[in-house]
Image (cartoon, helix red, strand yellow):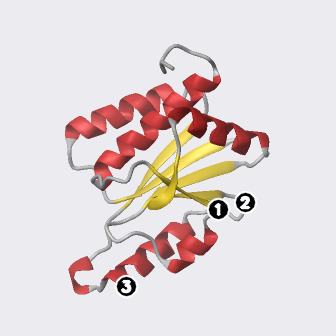
Amino acid sequence: MNIKLLAIGKTDHKALQILISEYEHRLKHYIKFELEIIPDIKNAKNLSEAQQKDKEGETILKKLNSTDVLILLDENGKQYSSVDFSSFLQKKMNSGIKRLVFVIGGPYGFSNAVYKKAEAKVSLSKMTFSHQMVRIFVVEQLYRAFTILRNEPYHHR
């Protein structure tokens, strides 16, 4: 299985980018991983929230293969402990899927079309984080999940 993380908008903060790169590097020891940044919608200020979500949604859906399993990072999604998240990933790997795609949406969430395509929604917290911070949290949790699955000493129970 491969894992792809799609995120809307670039990471402005160099410190965050360094951390993301560090965990991307670590994660590649366990699984083929790709982070793809979808550029912000041009002239978004002239669009309504719904129009912006629809445009972002079209772009997200174009990035998917027909066999991809789509998981949305969504504030209303299911919350997992790190151990439970590692079990979630193990089940996905055992199911034989080719690529698991996690998506961090734009500031207004996802379009209805993206919600319909998604197999699951995952919430990192009831708190709200910047979209740039969520990237590091997701990549770190993916790395943590694989260390848990391999019984490596990164995660303390």
- Residue linked to disc 3: 51
Q: Amino acid at mark 2?
A: Thr
Secondary structure of the residue carrying numbered label 1 = loop
Secondary structure of the residue carrying numbered label 2 = loop
x and y percent of residue 115 in the render? 55, 71
Q: Residue 105: which quarter of the image? A: bottom left
Left or right, residue 139 beside residue 116 = left
Q: Earlier in the sequence, mark 3 or mark 2?
A: 3
In 3D space, how far apart are the residues under numbered discs 3 and 2 (Cα atoms)?
Answer: 27 Å
x and y percent of residue 50 in the render? 38, 84
In 3D space, how far apart are the residues under numbered discs 1 and 2 (Cα atoms)?
Answer: 12 Å
The answer to whether residue 43 is visible is: no
x and y percent of residue 23 in the render? 42, 30
Residue at point 79% right, 46% down?
Answer: 95
Residue at point 72% right, 41% down?
Answer: 91
- Residue linked to disc 1: 119
